[in-house]
Amino acid sequence: MTKTGELFGRFAVYEQLGAGGMAVVHRAKWRGIEGFELDLALKRLRPQLAGKPDVVAAFVHEAKLSARLQHNNVARTYELGKVGETYFIAQELVNGRDVKTILRRASLAGTRMPLAVVVWLLAELCDALDYTHNRVDDDTGRPLDIVHRDISPSNVMMTTTGHIKVIDFGIAEAVIDDTYPARVRGKYGYMSPEALRGERLDARSDIYSVGVLAYEALICDRLFTREEREARKSGERLDPPLPPSLYRADCPRELDAIVLRTLTNRRQDRWPSARILRDALQALAHAAGLKSAASTAAAWLSELFAEDEETFTAVEVSELLAEMSTLVETPPVS
């Protein structure tokens, strides 16, 4: 177990934030000259995997990709490095809660995320994805064609100031490294039908995942049951979901239509881009008189977790570990 304040290169390493099969994440402090300090999340490749070229390539791929993304709604990557034989990625420490934790707390409290907060969350998420999907190589101007591939409540953070941060580009795809092997990976409950089939993905696959997250934020429950997730895993096509307003009376039919369009099985029937989806959400907020803003989201989040005394951290350990069992890497369904 890591000791409090363990020295790792120029970092002081503190409590563990999460762990997976490839890496462990800790809160750390970057100590520079003249008393310079920066709190961050330190993601370290497990030492026993340092000799596996494919694992190292995947770790390097994540760092190279996420370092290209400089947007207010995307958690930043500062450095890829190596101390001894241990590879690390230094990343932004997000002061907030992941959406999965937020929805679970709301469910336990017998409440739901207000419509204004749902729309704000989705609009900022779309801003992040619009930027990501349209990112080009700085040197060549060539589109990077980035697809996150793992948009889910555990990978979307809401900060204490009410803004959204997308995290974890560990399985994202982009045209930056032809040596990185593409695989069918993700969480069955959030993967698009084409992702489950192992097809070539584009931005509309992430838009499908946004739709699942939107539906769950509205109803404060999972969209797909365990049985339905297993059916999707085996390639079975499910009927379109029912309108969210059937489970939530204050959900406008216009929002029903927006969300259901993200969840069509045929990608050509979905919103063509995150920007157009964001514009539709903002138009709805204006027409419905929803006070959709960061201050609204921050106030609700503070009230929801008012009884908690601990400081917000990047990702709660229990939530991250629970998600690990649902992350899959399998052959595509035939």
Image (spheres, rainbow, N blue to C red):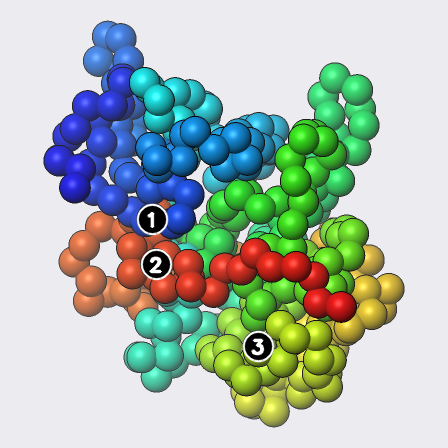
Residue that appears at 79% across and 20% down: 140
Q: Are marks 1 and 2 in contact (CB under 8 Å)?
A: yes
Mark 2 surroundings: few (<14), some (14-19) or many (≥20) residues within 10 A: some
Q: Is residue 3 visible in the rendered structure shown here?
A: yes
* In this view, 90 is above or below 118: above
For the N terminus, the image quarter is top left
Residue 19, which numbered label? 1
Q: Secondary structure at mark 1?
A: strand
Taking depth in this image into account, of 162 and 16 the one nearest to the observer is 16
Q: Earlier in the sequence, mark 3 or mark 2?
A: 3
* Residue 299 location (% of width, % of height): 37, 61
Residue 321, which numbered label? 2
* Residue 101 location (% of width, % of height): 37, 64
Q: Is residue 96 visible in the rendered structure shown here?
A: no
> Cα distance, mark 3 to mark 1?
24 Å
Q: Which residue is mark 3?
A: 229
* Residue 204 location (% of width, % of height): 76, 57
Q: Are marks 3 and 2 in contact (CB under 8 Å)?
A: no
* Residue 31 location (% of width, % of height): 26, 18
Taking depth in this image into account, of 251 and 50 the one nearest to the observer is 50
For residue 93, side relative to residue 36 (left or right): right
Q: Amino acid at mark 1?
A: Ala
Q: Earlier in the sequence, mark 1 or mark 2?
A: 1
